[in-house]
Amino acid sequence: MKQKPTKTAGHYPARGKMIGLKHLVISVLPMAFCVMPLANPAIAAKNKYDQCAGSLMNLNLSPQEVARSCSQSLDPENLASCVVDIAGGTDILAVDALATCRLVRRPLELATCVVDISKVGTAADAPAILDHCRRSLLPENFSKCVSGLVNQTDLGTTAALRYCIDGSDRDRNLNLSELPTDFRQ
């Protein structure tokens, strides 16, 4: 037969252990808050502005330019990635990459475009590549167009840039004068 637990000072033994656990948690909790400032570098590492500034400073950009660029960016991590990718994967200077990455809505696509086209281009083509990728509405498609033309034709990079940036996709055989003027039929 099971025996009922005996009461000790109005408490059951299991409940006494629970009260002891509460006291332990209450006494340890303030110490945890004292240790939290020591974890500050880990918190700072997750800060997107800190990461942006650190990445750009590693490229030897001026502190003022880094501060201005990271603070004004809506997505500082992507801005920094754009600059790092372009500066590391091409002959383009970090300061030029930063100036261009700040201007676009899709900095990661810009970086992909510039790096991919730079693989089939020359160092002399770098400024034109950077400018054309910036101007393109679909930088990744643009880079595929340029790379494909350069690889499969005898066109140079500059000529391929001009052909691919031309956004006209009109049917040359379409005669607009033959279209009906009344569309309500």
Image (spheres, helix red, strand yellow):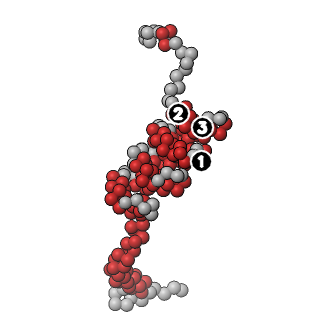
Please name the residue that numbered disc 1 is placed on: 119
Q: In this view, does 3 lie above or below 128?
A: below
Q: Which of 28 and 33 is in front in this view?
A: 33
Q: Quick one: label 2 or label 3, which is nearer the N terminus?
A: 3
**Residue 134 on image: x %, y %:** 45, 42
Instruction: Tell me which amino acid carries mark 3.
Output: Gly
Q: What residue type is labelled 2?
A: Arg
Residue 145: image location, x then y, percent: 58, 37
Q: Can residue 109 be seen in this view?
A: no
Q: Residues within 10 Å of mark 1 (few under 14, many from 20)?
A: few
Q: Quadrant of the C terminus?
A: top left
- Neighbor class of circle 3 (other Cα within 10 Å; few <14, some 14-19, many 20+) is some
Name the disc covering residue 162, or none: 2
| Whether label 1 touches label 2, CB < 8 Å | no
Residue 27 spot, x, y in % from top left: 34, 83
User: Circles 2 and 3: CB distance less than 8 Å?
Assistant: no
Circle 3 is placed at which residue position?
Answer: 156
